[in-house]
Image (tube, rainbow, N blue to C red):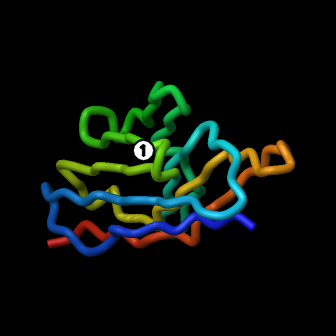
Amino acid sequence: QVQLVESGGGLVQPGGSLRLSCAASGSISSINVMNWYRQAPGKQRELVAAITRGGNTNYADSVKGRFTISRDNAKNTVYLQMDSLKPDDTAVYYCNAAIVVWSQKQYDYWGQGTQVTVSS
């Protein structure tokens, strides 16, 4: 059994910052790529940022220069530092990870989502 638990969402004013965390727990052998997605009302879920086990990162054009993804492999945790937030960043943010469990099979797991609202 593997779980991803997100935290850190909330209400913030435009220009403000938030830091999301996502901790994986359970029968984990290793974690490969870890991602943050978001889904705004009436829109499709989109990839925001990704990070490999070795630390290579990739960002959506809309968040480049404002968001930073990082991870702590020892804690099985991925972070998303969000700065200079805009109202368009309002969405439910989901953590996603490719996890190798003790049977050495890899599966795709999702967190429950955390709401981020950017509004004055």
- Kindly identify the residue that appears in the image at 32 percent across and 33 percent down: 64
- Kindly identify the residue that appears in the image at 46 percent across and 30 percent down: 58
**Where 102 falls versus 24 (above or below)?**
above
- Kindly identify the residue that appears in the image at 57 percent across and 72 percent down: 112
Quadrant the C terminus occupies: bottom left
In this rendering, the count of numbered labels is 1
**Where 75 falls versus 31 (above or below)?**
below
- Kindly identify the residue that appears in the image at 14 percent across and 58 percent down: 16
- Tell whether 7 sits left or right of 36: left
For this rendering, which residue is in front, 88 or 21?
21
For this rendering, which residue is in front, 116 or 100?
100
Residue 101 x, y percent position in the rendering? 76, 51
Quadrant the N terminus occupies: bottom right
Q: Report the residue marked by disc 1.
A: 72
For this rendering, which residue is in front, 7 or 118?
7
Residue 113 x, y percent position in the rendering? 52, 69
Residue 53 x, y percent position in the rendering? 55, 32
At label 1, counting other C-alpha atoms closer than 10 Å, the crowd grade (few under 14, some 14-19, many 20 or more) is few
**Where 57 falls versus 91 (above or below)?**
above
Residue 61 x, y percent position in the rendering? 40, 33
Q: Based on the displayed image, in which of its 4 quarters is residue 30 positioned?
A: top right
Q: Amino acid type of disc 1?
A: Asp
Q: Based on the displayed image, in which of its 4 quarters is residue 45 positioned?
A: bottom right
- Tell whether 91 sits left or right of 83: right
Q: Secondary structure at mark 1?
A: strand
